[in-house]
Amino acid sequence: MASLLCTLQDHRDDVNCCALSDRLLASCSGDKTVRVYSCEDFRELPFSPLRAHAYGVHCCCFSSCGRYLASCSTDALTIHNKKGYEMLLLYTLTAQSAPVLCCALSFDGQLLVSGSVDKTVTVYDANHGELLHTLTQHDRYVTACAFSPCTLMFASGSMDKTVNIWRIGDGNAEASEPLKTSVQGRKSLGYSRTLVSDWSEEDVSEWLRDEGFEALVDTFRAHNIDGAELINLNTEVLTTEFNIESVGLRGQILRKIKDLRSSLIDSDVPDEFLCPITRELMKDPVIAADGFSYEREAMESWISTPNRSSPMTNLPLQTMILTPNRSLKTAIQRWKSSH
């Protein structure tokens, strides 16, 4: 059973993240501050709040020893060092060219990773504030990252629907390569790193094995099914030509094919046609006061909250007026009709 110990109400805007060390609690907010509390009595420490950011703070994290505290925002990534009764700003890191959405410190406090809207993952030497690696394997915003609690392995997650797992090595080329990319949300990239529609028969066979349909590999090969044929298969073909009598099995295959079709469409959508908030194809695009275009429903929901800042810049919106972006809507409709 869980019991409530304390409720802290010091922030003046949405709390975006919180982190615990063995002695300290940190929280960060859209009010541009990071607040630090003692875990003994939950009193805010004298040096709190930390005001190293000019915009809302997206994420914060401690090193396992509690000595280092990192935080990230639209403007930068920062590292603070606790010395005695003070929390000193060590570094302000600006290697990424867009808002930094997430950060994580390694178990020994030696390394700091961060993910950004610019689609990169950066790795820093936390002791010296030096950039060690800039990793560019993600295709969209990097929204999450996490270190292993006992090894120099970390993961990064992105709006491109993938999770990459990385190992920090001894400086050789292999240290910057992802160990593994999650199968979930493969972004319609086949096993030969081509679009599904361009898969060869061997790619389809490999996909069947990976999805647990190895018994059907010979059947698909006998019918010369490549990627273009695969995404057009239907119940009738599976029943009459492939002699797959099991309704359940046909359903499983068709669901997997539907996922491939969806990911094929997603991978081909121009980024400017996607709403920055939902990352979905816009139906009724509007221009907000920050100059960016959003899906009307998503933006109306966004500005209905007390936080009236831009989703893209974190700067205050000067007006809540949304102007229809008719030229973008026409462009989206033309793209849809051609696909």
Image (cartoon, rainbow, N blue to C red):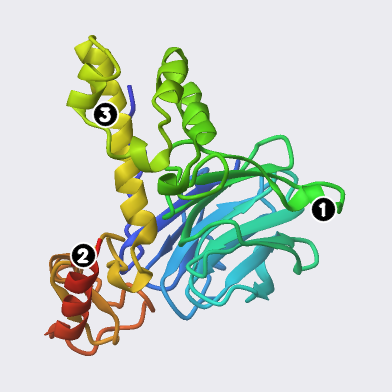
Front position among marks 2 and 1: 2
Circle on res. 173? 1
| Residue farthest toward the top in the current orientation of the protein | 245
Front position among marks 1 and 3: 3
| Residue farthest toward the bottom in the current orientation of the protein | 318
Circle on res. 339? none
Across and down, in percent, residue 203 comes to 52, 35
For label 3, the SS is: helix
**Amino acid at pointer 1:** Ala
Tag 1 or tag 2, which sits nearer the N-term? 1
Against 253, is 315 above or below?
below
The reply to whether residue 25 is visible in this rendering is no
Q: Are marks 2 and 1 in contact (CB under 8 Å)?
A: no
Tag 3 or tag 1, which sits nearer the N-term? 1
> Residue tagged by mark 3?
254
Nearer to us in this view, 146 or 139: 139
Query: Where's the N terminus, which quadrant?
Result: top left
- Give the image quarter of residue 120: bottom right
Q: Residue at x 23, y 87 (%)?
A: 289
Spatial CA distance of label 2 from label 1 is 42 Å
**Amino acid at pointer 2:** Lys
Q: Residue at x 43, y 77 (%)?
A: 55
**Amino acid at pointer 3:** Leu
Q: Residue at x 37, y 77 (%)?
A: 314
> Residue tagged by mark 2?
336
